[in-house]
Amino acid sequence: MALIMNDKIKASEVQLLALDGKPLGEMPTKDALKLAKDQGADLVCLNIMQSPPQCQLVARGKAKSVLKRDDQAPKKSKEIRLKPKI
C-alpha cells in the first residue's frame, strides 16, 4: 500500500485526527496542511476509500511506522495435509 502524504492528498476535505488520535472533525485539506506545518508534522491519509478520506497528523519522519503497524496484521496461511496415500 502506497503512503499518501501532505500535498499528494487530492481531496478537497479530510476527516482529521490529531497527533494523539483524537478526532478534530472535517476540514478543508489546505487548513489541515497548514495545521500540520504549524505543528511540525506530516498529514498522512489512512483510508482513501472513505468520503471524506480519513487523515492523521503524524510526527515528521514517523509516517512509515504507521504503515508498518497496519502491515503487521495476522495473515491467513494455507495448510496442506500429507498422508501416506497420495
Image (cartoon, helix red, strand yellow):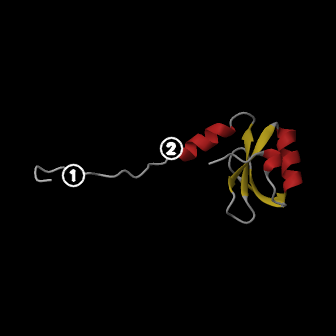
Binning the other alpha carbons within 10 Å of mark 1 as few (below 14), some (14 to 19) or many (20 upward) gives few
Which residue is rendered at x = 75% and y = 35% of the image?
60
Image location (x, y in percent) of residue 70: 56, 47
Q: Secondary structure at mark 2?
A: loop
Dot label at residue 81: 1
Distance, label 1 to label 2, CA atoms, is 27 Å
Which residue is rendered at x = 82% and y = 61% of the image?
13
Which residue is rendered at x = 88% and y = 52% of the image?
31
User: At label 2, which amino acid type do we have?
Assistant: Gln
Q: Secondary structure at mark 1?
A: loop
Q: Nearer the viewer, residue 71 or 23?
A: 71
Dot label at residue 72: 2
Image location (x, y in percent) of residue 8: 80, 49
The answer, for residue 26, to whether it is visible in the render is no
Q: Nearer the viewer, residue 35 or 80?
A: 80
Q: Nearer the viewer, residue 25 or 83?
A: 83
Residue 25 lies in what quarter of the image?
bottom right
User: At label 1, which amino acid type do we have?
Assistant: Arg
Closer to us: mark 1 or mark 2?
1
Count all numbered tags in the image, as a single digit: 2
Image location (x, y in percent) of residue 9: 79, 52
Which residue is rendered at x = 43% and y = 50% of the image?
75
Q: Earlier in the sequence, mark 1 or mark 2?
A: 2
The answer, for residue 59, to whether it is visible in the render is yes
- Residue 33 vs residue 62: left or right? right
